[in-house]
Image (cartoon, rainbow, N blue to C red):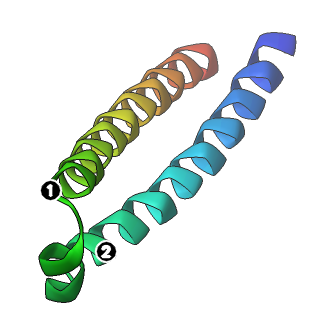
Amino acid sequence: LDDTVSLSEEAARLRKEVDKVEIELERVRQKLSKPDFLAKAKQEVVVKEREKSAALEEKIGALNRSLQRIRELQAQAGS
């Protein structure tokens, strides 16, 4: 039972982290979608924001894979 509670708590923590990272990713995407930002910002700033976007996408993927694994473990524990 303790493992199930721990898995549930970890899943909740991961969902919260996914939400947080998705908000940050949306902020970066909005910045990169503005022609004014792209025209006025230094090239290295634009590159850094694109790299940040890619890193955030990777992090969301990793978090979602962890969530999926927890769901699988919970399903196994429930059967």
Q: Is residue 7 above or below residue 59?
A: above
Near mark 1 (Cα within 10 A), the count class, few <14, some 14-19 or many ≥20, is: few
Residue 54 has which mark? none
Which callout, 2 or 1, points at the residue further toward the start of the chain?
2
In the shown orientation, is residue 27 left or right of residue 73? left
Q: Are marks 2 and 1 in contact (CB under 8 Å)?
A: no
Which one is in front, 39 or 11?
39
Residue 60 on image: x %, y %: 38, 41
Q: CA distance from mark 2 to mark 1?
A: 14 Å
Q: Of helix, strand and loop, which one carries label 2?
A: helix
Residue position for label 1: 43
Residue position for label 2: 31
In the shown orientation, is residue 34 left or right of residue 17? left
Q: Of helix, strand and loop, which one carries label 1?
A: helix
Residue occupying image coordinates x 77% and y 32%: 9
Q: Is residue 11 above or below residue 31?
A: above
Figure quadrant of the N terminus: top right
In the shown orientation, is residue 47 left or right of residue 23? left
Residue 32 on image: x %, y %: 22, 70
Residue 77 placement: quadrant = top right
Give the amino acid type for the residue marked by disc 1 in the picture.
Gln
Figure quadrant of the C terminus: top right
Which one is in front, 34 or 12?
34
Which one is in front, 70 or 55?
55
